[in-house]
Image: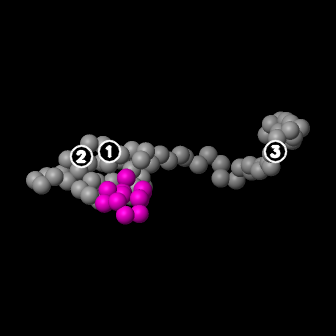
Amino acid sequence: FNDEIHTARNVTKTHTSNINTFQSPNQGPLGILTKDNVQFYNQPYKQQSFKIINYQLKVPLIKAYMGMESDIFNFYAQQN
C-alpha cells in the first residue's frame, strides 16, 4: 500500500487509479516501511467485547415517525 501499513478493518480504497489510493480515514496508517526498517506510529484499535447478561431478553422493535404519539413508548418504558 505505497509503503504504508494499514489495518484491514480501517483501510479503504479512496480513488480508482491514484497510486496512493489506500487510506485509513478514521485512524491513519499504523506505520510506514522505509528502506531499512519498519516504523510504527499508531496501534490498532482493540475490539471491545461485552459480557452477555441475559440472552433471552426480549427487546421490542418500534417503528417511529415524525408526529406520532408517545403512548407506545410510554407503554414499553413501564414494562419490566
Are dots 2 and 3 in contact, CB under 8 Å?
no
Q: What residue type is labelled 1?
A: Gln
| Quadrant containing the C terminus in the rendered view | top right
Label 2 sits on a secondary structure element that is strand
- Name the residue that disc number 1 marks: 43
The residue where tag 3 is placed is 65
Range of magenta residues: 12-23
Tell me which amino acid carries mark 2. Answer: Phe
Tell us which disc is closer to us: 3 or 1.
Answer: 3
Q: Residue furthest left?
A: 36
Residue 50, percent from left and from top: 53, 46
Q: Is the magenta stretch mostly helix, strand or loop?
A: loop
Q: Which amino acid does label 3 sit on?
A: Tyr
Disc nearer the start of the sequence (3/1): 1
Binning the other alpha carbons within 10 Å of mark 2 as few (below 14), some (14 to 19) or many (20 upward) gives few
Q: Which of 18 and 1 lies nearest the eye of the viewer?
A: 18
Residue 9, image x and y in percent? 42, 55
Residue 77, image x, y percentages: 80, 37
